[in-house]
Amino acid sequence: MNQEVRFRRKHVIIFLSIIGILFIYSLSSSRDCAGSEQFSRSKVDGAESWEAGQGRDAFLPNRKGPTIYAVTPTYARPVQKAELTRLSQVIRLVPNVFWVIVEDASQTSTLVTNLLRRSGLQERSVQLFAKTPTNFKLQGKDPNWLKPRGVEQRNEALKWIRNRLKHNALGEPESPGHSIVYFMDDDNTYSTELFEEMSTIERGKVGVWPVGLVGGLMVEKPVLNRDGLVLGFNSAWKPERPFPLDMAGFAISSDLLLENPQAQFSYEVERGYQESEILRHLTIVHDMQPLANRCKDVLVWHTRTETPKLDAEKALQKSGKKSNDGMEV
């Protein structure tokens, strides 16, 4: 009899314990729901409510700010998709970036079209093409510095951006809002913080900042005086250039490009002078706007992908086969 009573007491205790745990869990869930509801209300009260279709993008930084036209010249090669995929992941995290991809080809490619579709950036991008003239095209084992690269593609992008800013969908003139143009090469590495800095560029200004791993130095950077005025650059390679900085180290307020239609890139300038060629029409060194914590932070790096060794692939192709048959790599 005593054993039976103890057995019943044990079951009662277990049952009560389960009821207690469920009660505590229900209270905790109610508090979480109330907290979420309060958070949603606070966002509405703060005029930051989600717009239809924002979804997870509502959590991303830099939603408000000028449109940043990121210009990327690209060409077909084994690492092209890998390079553009890396860039697409960065651009997805910065909602006010509009990606202008310009292929060095006689028409746009399926590879780039597929990449934009899969990355969900179709609505925030345009796919252009502009083929480099044969006499300016690198041949065989030519070093990449022998001839200017990206000239035709960047100029095509500038033409498209200027037309977009001048005209609306009906082809009528419109007053363009503040926007920024940045030359975002596909072989560099970019921090999302860079685009937050870029968004602060004022009208009529060219913003500048340090670039890591370039020109034979750990970092090339603008040199400022005590008042934050740009005095020059610490470039070790051709420091006599009017603007001795890397393409990744500046961005331009779009109004400057509209006011100076002659500002573009050229095949006629010597090696290393492409940056100076466009900037000489737009600004002077002392008038540039230093960013990135008074040019103390490195937010972009001039990294380059190693050319893959495909000797086995070449041997396979000679036999009429290929490892990526039916695949896009």
Image: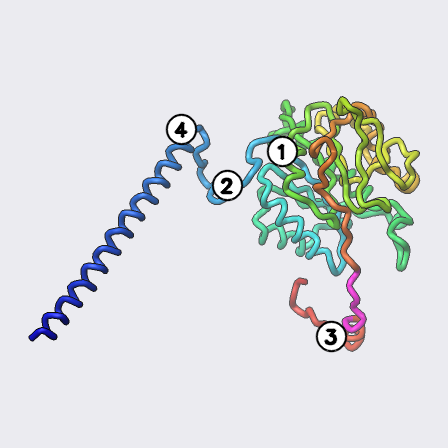
Location of residue 326 with respect to 53 vertically, above or below:
below
Q: Pick whichever, 327 or 228, lies toward us.
A: 228
Residue under label 1, please give it.
Answer: 67
Identified by mark 1, the residue type is Thr
- Can residue 19 be seen at all in this image of the molecule? yes
- Can residue 106 be seen at all in this image of the molecule? no
Identified by mark 4, the residue type is Asp
Q: CA distance from mark 2 to mark 4?
A: 17 Å
Whether residue 123 sits left or right of residue 32 in the image: it is right
Q: Is there a contact, CB below 8 Å, between mark 1 and mark 4? A: no
Q: Give the foreground label among 3 and 1.
A: 1
Residue under label 3, please give it.
Answer: 321
Q: Secondary structure at mark 3?
A: loop
Residue under label 2, please give it.
Answer: 59
Boundaries of the magenta span:
307-313
Q: CA distance from mark 3 to mark 1?
A: 46 Å
Identified by mark 2, the residue type is Phe
Q: Residue 170: x and y, percent?
A: 60, 30
Answer few, some or many: residues within 10 Å of disc 1's Cα (few below 14, many 20 plus, some between 14 and 19): some
Residue for point 77% across, 26% down = 288
Residue under label 4, please give it.
Answer: 45
